[in-house]
Image (cartoon, helix red, strand yellow):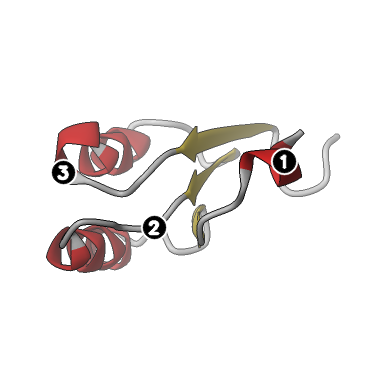
């Protein structure tokens, strides 16, 4: 048995509508409870409203225990 969940999904990239984080969040409702998602990144270029929207979407879908947001991380720290 694993610690936090049996399956962890990592989504890395700038938070922007065209990248579809909202699609991943909505799709996550179809996955089993033993799956978690980490969204790594932050908004740039005026995407503050979209970032607020995806955070709110996670709350509305009751996924706050399964989806975690992590601020921008340099590629060096990911290695």
List the residue tagged with mark 3.
17
List the residue tagged with mark 2.
42
**Measuring 36% from the left and 45% from the top, which residue is drawn there?**
14
List the residue tagged with mark 1.
76
**Measuring 74% from the left and 49% from the top, which residue is drawn there?**
4
Q: Provide residue 75's location: percent of width, then percent of height.
A: 63, 39
Inter-mark Cα distance, 1 to 3: 25 Å
Q: Between tags 2 and 1, which lies in front?
A: 1
Q: Who comes first in sequence, dot 2 or dot 1?
A: 2
Tell me the SS state at disc 3.
Answer: helix
Image quarter of the N terminus? top right
> Is the C-beta separation of discs 2 and 3 under 8 Å?
no
Q: Provide residue 46's location: percent of width, then percent of height.
A: 15, 62
Q: Quadrant of residue 31?
A: top left
Q: Provide residue 55's location: percent of width, then percent of height.
A: 30, 64
**Measuring 20% from the left and 56% from the top, which residue is drawn there?**
45
Q: Who comes first in sequence, dot 1 or dot 3?
A: 3
Q: Provide residue 57's location: percent of width, then percent of height.
A: 23, 59
**Measuring 73% from the left and 46% from the top, which residue is drawn there?**
77
User: Badge 1, how many Cα within 10 Å: few under 14, some, many 20+?
Assistant: few
Q: Please tell me whether residue 33 is drawn above or below residue 64 in the rendered image.
A: above
User: Badge 3, how many Cα within 10 Å: few under 14, some, many 20+?
Assistant: some
Q: Please tell me whether residue 61 is drawn above or below residue 9 in the rendered image.
A: below
> Is the C-beta separation of discs 1 and 3 under 8 Å?
no
């Amino acid at each position: 048995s694993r610690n936090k969940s049996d399956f962890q999904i990592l989504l890395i990239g700038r938070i922007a509508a065209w990248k579809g984080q909202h699609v991943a969040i909505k799709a996550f409702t179809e996955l089993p409870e033993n799956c978690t998602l980490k969204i790594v990144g932050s908004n740039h270029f005026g995407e503050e409203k979209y970032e607020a929207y995806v955070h709110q979407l996670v709350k509305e879908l009751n996924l706050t225990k399964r989806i975690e947001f992590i601020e921008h991380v340099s590629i060096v720290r990911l290695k």
